[in-house]
Amino acid sequence: MFVYGAICERKNLQVRHFQLPLPGWPSTRAGYRIALLADFHVQNLDTAELASQAIHLAIAEQPDMIVLAGDFVDDWFPSLPPLLGDVLAPLHQMKGRVVAIPGNHDYFSAPPDALATICDELGILLLRNSCEVLDGICWVGVDSYQARASKPDQAMKAAQALGPDLPKVVLWHEPDAVDFLPTGANLMLSGHSHGGQFVLPGGWAPKHSTMGRKYVRGFYPHAKTPIFVTSGVGTTFLPSRFNCPPEVAILTLNPA
């Protein structure tokens, strides 16, 4: 199973479509489409190629917004920023319709300063405990919980001040952190869990990510804030997937 997952399923990238009915979502934004990508874990040419494929598939779907939910890299080393820049370069054609947050791995070995520089050059809005209004939606980005960089209260207060009547979508890398999110958001988007990554028959995953055990994969409409967790693109710990292929998640948001 491990060998099959490493050779085949790890690269079996899929585009999956999801309908998300959300309480309080405005009818003026009915049918709003988000392409959600996370967990590239770029570290070499092989992982960079898979991340590039995911980005091209997301762009081809012509979404209203692309969300990059953290863990761009597996670890920082000197030759990595140029490689990551090449991977993300096609997103420049989205003309500012890309929002992103750092993940915990983006703090490994160094703070995500290189990531911030790349995003700035490509017109990607990197949110770190901050918010911005785009397309009539307040996008709230909370920095990584595991990196001890998150300030959800600060981010949500800023969002309420910026647009108290606007719909709010929160980006926070670690899904289990949704239980700590102040009320007021319509949706939270996360990665981090890899959907379990290696899932045995019956749905049991031998290993879960810290802060990715409760909300593992898919849509949880009855969480404190409705949350969608993508299975992500790359791998961590072991370079294999089983019964949990990498995905580009296309989310269509509608009023509940």
Image (cartoon, rainbow, N blue to C red):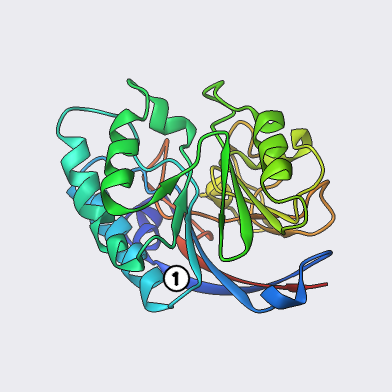
Observer-nearest of 128 and 22: 128
Q: Position of residue 121 (x, y in %)?
A: 26, 47
**Residue 256 falls in image quadrant:** bottom right
Q: Is residue 157 visible?
A: yes
Q: Position of residue 60 (x, y in %)?
A: 37, 77
Residue type of the residue flagged with mark 1:
Gln
Residue at horizontal 47 percent and vertical 73 percent from the top: 15
The quadrant of the image that shows the N terminus is bottom left
Residue 87 as seen in the image, left or right of residue 112: left
Residue at horizontal 80 percent and vertical 47 percent from the top: 184
Q: Is residue 42 visible?
A: no
Observer-nearest of 28 and 41: 28
Residue 237 as seen in the image, left or right of residue 184: left
Q: Residues within 10 Å of mark 1 (few under 14, many from 20)?
A: some
Above or below, 248 against 132 in this view is: below
The total of numbered circles placed on residues is 1
Residue at horizontal 46 percent and vertical 37 percent from the top: 102
Above or below, 126 against 105 in this view is: below
Q: Position of residue 143 (x, y in %)?
A: 54, 33
Q: Secondary structure at mark 1?
A: strand
Q: Position of residue 115 (x, y in %)?
A: 32, 37
* Residue highlighted by disc 1: 14
Residue at horizontal 42 percent and vertical 32 percent from the top: 105
